[in-house]
Amino acid sequence: METLEAIRKRRSVRNFTGEKVPREDLLKIIAAGHMAASGHNKQPWDFVVVTEREMLDEIAARCSAWVAKAAAVIVIVVDPASRWWMEDGSAVAENILLAATDLGYGSVWLEGRMLPHEEYFKQRLGIPADRRILTFVPIGVPEAWPAAPAKKALDEVLHWERW
Ligand SMILES: Cc1cc2nc3c(=O)[nH]c(=O)nc-3n(C[C@H](O)[C@H](O)[C@H](O)COP(=O)(O)O)c2cc1C
């Protein structure tokens, strides 16, 4: 798939079949995240890949029920001592969403529902106290590809030369 096609096709997918995703595909997706740009090339990130049923169910119970049918949740962990941790982690997350799309999988940036449980999952997943979870990214085989969500017209937000 061409890059622009993946960008256009990407959706937040929240309906999965429950089928497994091969480990090599998860590795390709994570490697794409790991190729992201980062301020001063600090790469202040780590990945925790959750595929075990018990933990997927815990994430589903605390965050969003539909996670139970995801094949994996990629936990993007960042070092907040690094100056651009949020930007760097976000670049990783977008690369992961696009790589998942490219390989035909559904994915979603699951941050809002994760944040109230961040400390709980840091402990459960053995993540060092001085790190943050930027977001969870559930990955799975989509049951159906969602329709395009409403987006602002580009004209509304685009300013050539000056605002
Ligand atoms: C910072 C951030 C936090 C998000 N948190 C959640 C979340 O907690 N749960 C969820 O289902 N989607 C979450 N999303 C996905 C958005 O709802 C989604 O990107 C938006 O509705 C646009 O849809 P699209 O991704 O299909 O273009 C989040 C996205 C971002 C960028």
Image (cartoon, rainbow, N blue to C red):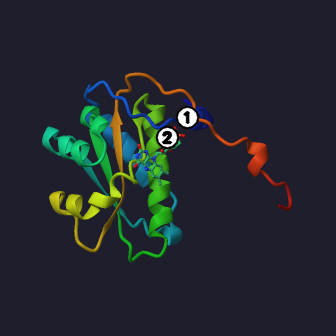
Q: Position of residue 21 (x, y in %)?
A: 29, 31
121 to 26, vertically: above or below: below
Q: Amino acid at mark 2?
A: Leu
Locate residue 162 relative to residue 12 in the image: left or right. Answer: right
Q: Position of residue 139 (x, y in %)?
A: 34, 37
Lower sequence index among marks 2 and 1: 1
| Res. 61 image quadrant | top left
Q: Could one spot residue 49 in this view of the protein?
A: yes
Dot 2 corresponds to which residue?
Answer: 98
Task: Using the image as rendered, state which of residue 83 and residue 153 is in the foreground.
Answer: 153
Task: Give neighbour class at mark 1: few <14, some 14-19, many 20+ (Cα, 10 Å).
Answer: some
Identified at 35% across, 27% down, the residue is: 141
86 to 29, vertically: above or below: below
Q: Could one spot residue 35 in this view of the protein?
A: no
Identified at 42% across, 50% down, the residue is: 33
- Label 2 with label 1: CB-CB less than 8 Å: yes
Q: Amino acid at mark 1?
A: Ala
Dot 1 corresponds to which residue?
Answer: 6
Q: Position of residue 133 (x, y in %)?
A: 33, 61
